[in-house]
Structure formats: structure tokens, C-alpha cells
Image: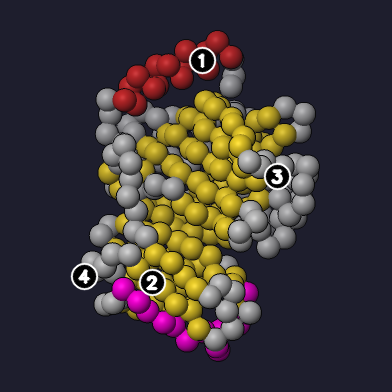
Amino acid sequence: MKNITFALIGVFTFMSTFLYSQTYTTGVIELFNDQTNLYTAQIDVSSTLVTLTLSGPDNKYLGLGFDAMSMTAGKDVVIWLNDGTFKLTDRSFIGVGSEPVMDAEQDWTIVSNTTSGGQRQVVAIRLPNTGNPNDYVFSTSASSIDLVWSFEAGTGYIMGWHGANRGSTRESFTLGTQEVVKTEFSIYPNPSKSRLNVNLKTLSNDARIEVLDILGKKVYSNSLNTLQNTINVSKWHSGVYLVRISQANQVVTKRFVKQ
């Protein structure tokens, strides 16, 4: 993004290398889905390239922070904006409740920006290690990453309070293929006052469930021995929770609302 010619040359050079290098991926992460707004992210990392794919409502800003479970000062964050020109801005948190500040170096290059049916998909790339102190260094091996996310409460790409449209999750990088098949599960009813049903499509002997509140505090943890499971949530405080299933070296997180 520093120079359009350099950026285009870089895209082709990086993509050529990307095709022949080992890639680790989070697969598609469903960050938020209330049947009206859907926000997903995917991170693919090779030894030479990070590819970030964000998909969300096409009339809102989209934010994703790396190595963070809150707006921790100094942590790396990107925000998709349309303040006259569509762009993915490279920023740093300066604390909870404060707008993240722009980095001196803008290291993400947009590869594609498409919309369909009210949903926008943005694909951008950068080096795993940019050398800039404010940028997160992505691991080029199997690992995990903490992510914090938000999107606009209103419309029109107005930077400000995101309302309840925010959360955090921890995701695993696994060896990627052309199509990554991740652990699948469903939760219902959602919202719920008394019980939470968790149904798995497949089950391994290391399957485990963890539930975290929106601040990242663990409120429930257990191993899973059956495909169909029920949790009593009647004594939980009302609010948003993250239901995380891990098995076979994969982790998938979904959002649950306790009424």
C-alpha cells in the first residue's frame, strides 16, 4: 500500500511463493451470527505470506485484533473502513474505549473486495513478520491465536462504540489443504434461559468443551463423550458467552446468549 506498483508486483511474487509453500490456517471462524448479521474471518499463514479474509455486513466497519482478548494497549488490530475510500487500516489499540490509532506503516495490501447480497468479503495480505514493532508476528507452524473482534452497531462506517457487536475467541492453526474441514457442532436454543444443547457432528476421544464469558473468563469446562450434550445454564448471568469445542487439534467457537 506504500506504492501501488510495488504492491501489485508484491502480490504476484507472494502468490507464486504461496502456491508452493506449506500453509497453516484457522479455517473459516464464525465470529458472530444472529441471522441478521454474519461476521467471519479466516487467517492463512505460510513462511512468506499471511492472507486475511474478512466477511461481514457491507455497510459497517469490521475490526479484528491479534494476540488479544480485549482492547489491550499496544496490540495489533486491523479495521475495514469506507471513509471515502475503501481500505483496510493497520492500527494499534491504546486502551478500552479509545479508538485504535493508525500505525505509521500500513502493511496490509488488499487483494480483493467484493459484495453480494449485503455481505462484503475482503481479502488482504502481508508478511508474517513486517519488522514493525506494532505488528503481530504470525507463527509459521501449528499454533493458536487469540482474536478480539467488533463491527459497527449502526451503519455508514462511523468509528465509535460497537455496542454488543464484539467478542473474543482463541483459534488453532492447522495444516491447510485446499478445503479445510473443521469440527462442526450446533447449539440451541439460542438465546436460552435454562439449558444449552450442544450437538457434535463427529466425536473424537479428546473432545472438550469450554464456555467463556465476553471478558474471556472460563465459566464451564468439561470433556465430551457423546454427540448430544445438554448444559444447565439457569444460574449463569445474562449476557453473551463463547462456546468453544476442541477436538482432533481443531478448535471452533460459537456465540451463545443467556437470557
Look at discs 4 and 2 and give the one toward the viewer.
2
| Label 1 vs 4, first from the N-terminus | 1
What whole-number distance in Å separates the C-alpha atoms at marks 2 and 1? Answer: 45 Å
Q: What residue is at 41 percent from the left and 55 percent from the top?
A: 171
Reply above or below: 112 against 210: above
What whole-number distance in Å separates the C-alpha atoms at marks 1 and 4? Answer: 47 Å
| Residue 8, numbered circle | 1
Q: What residue is at 54 percent from the left and 41 percent from the top?
A: 54
| Residue 60, numbered circle | 3
What whole-number distance in Å separates the C-alpha atoms at marks 3 and 2? Answer: 32 Å
Q: Which residue is mark 4?
A: 205
Q: Amino acid at mark 3?
A: Lys
Q: What residue is at 77 percent from the left and 47 percent from the top?
A: 155
Look at discs 1 and 3 and give the one toward the viewer.
3
Q: Which residues are magenta?
A: 227-239
Q: What residue is at 66 percent from the left and 42 percent from the top?
A: 118
- Extreme residue toward the bottom, this view: 235
What whole-number distance in Å separates the C-alpha atoms at marks 3 and 4? Answer: 41 Å
| Label 3 vs 2, first from the N-terminus | 3
